[in-house]
Image (tube, helix red, strand yellow):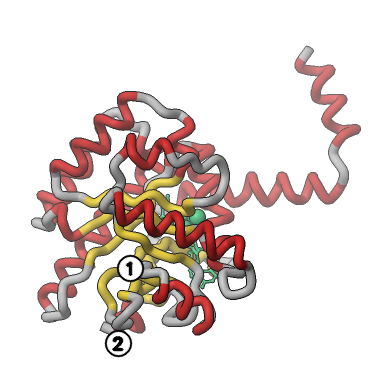
Amino acid sequence: AAKKSKLNSYKLFSPAMERASFKHFELQNDLRKAIHSDEFELYYQPKVRSHTRQIVGAEALIRWNHPTRGIVSPGEFIPLAEESGLIVPLGEWVLENVCKQIRKWEAKGYPAIVVSLNFSALQMLQKGLVDTVEAILDEHNVAGESIEIEITESLILNDDSDLLKKLEQLRELGIRIAIDDFGTGYSSLSYLTKYKFNTIKLDRSFIHDIHTSPDNQAIIKFIIQLSNQLKMKVVAEGVELEEQLAHLVEMNCDEIQGFLFSKPLPVGQFERLL
Ligand code: C2E
Ligand code: MG
Ligand code: MG
Ligand code: MG
């Protein structure tokens, strides 16, 4: 049977697909080495209060400085890291580095900000996740209140009591939990009450035409009101234009993240904004 499927696969693969799968294979291999050869770097994108434009937080976003390909975006390699399970040690690396960075900013006397980081579904589903997070925070002497974990709704589709329990335990450590990319995929209002997120991040596909689409305005306005009722903070992602910001300010959206203020920046450049 194995032979047969191999033969079939030869017929099915076009040269372009073969090149794509070779690249996939190569990146997968390189990824394994990258974590040991220090090729990852965290960029930080500011989150600002919409009314005052004051920086109140940052999202840590991983970048891979590939030795020959240059910077590879997380959109490309995070799925590969999930596929191989490498996302688990990589996620720990991210948390470690966020903690170190928080301590450095503290030592340099910068005002305290909450740093958000993304956890993938596979990471959240790990057995010892909460213990690992607690150990890393302790090791670096960082308070849970200093960080926020962003998760996406793909995780919620796997809905189970284990996830609810983990989120509860993370919150007991003082860590905030955000639902990322809200409004994409299978967003359901019912899980907003079930999971008690601290923050809801409106996906940038919503924000994109907020200034031209009365329908999207109505939806966003509704979600913001609902979030306020449920005591969640609202962050709008992908704000690129003053017009978009104006609508969000009027709707009382709490925080803004987007190219209008800044792209994700390497640490040195981010510090200049602080
Ligand atoms: P995300 O968590 O939704 O992060 C926001 C993404 O939107 C970032 O892309 C950011 O650069 C981009 N963005 C922010 N403002 C704007 C804007 O005004 N316009 C446009 N066009 N884009 C904007 P990035 O850094 O390429 O990250 C993509 C995704 O990769 C993230 O989406 C997140 O899901 C994932 N990711 C990034 N870092 C990590 C990580 O450390 N761990 C995990 N598990 N996933 C990560
Ligand atoms: Mg995010
Ligand atoms: Mg997002
Ligand atoms: Mg995303």
Q: Which mark is residue 254?
A: 1
- Quarter of the image where the C terminus is located: bottom left
Disc 1 crowd rating (10 Å Cα; few below 14, some 14-19, many 20+) is: many
In this picture, residue 192 sits left or right of residue 176: right
In this picture, residue 197 sits left or right of residue 63: left
Considering every residue shown, the one lying at the far bottom of the view is 272
- Closer to the camera, 224 or 96? 224
- Quarter of the image where the N terminus is located: top right
Tell me the residue at 37%/66% (across/down).
42
Work out whether residue 36 can be spotted: no
Disc 2 crowd rating (10 Å Cα; few below 14, some 14-19, many 20+) is: few
Q: Position of residue 205 (x, y in %)?
A: 58, 61
Q: Position of residue 218 (x, y in %)?
A: 53, 61
Relative to 45, does residue 14 appear above or below in the rendering?
above
Work out whether residue 242 can be spotted: yes
Q: What's the distance in space between the residues labelled 2 and 1, CA to CA? A: 23 Å
Q: Nearer the viewer, mark 2 or mark 1?
A: 1
- Closer to the camera, 131 or 231? 231
Q: Quadrant of residue 37?
A: bottom left
Relative to 10, does residue 184 appear above or below in the rendering?
below
Q: Secondary structure at mark 2?
A: helix
Q: Which residue is mark 2?
A: 272
Q: Secondary structure at mark 1?
A: loop
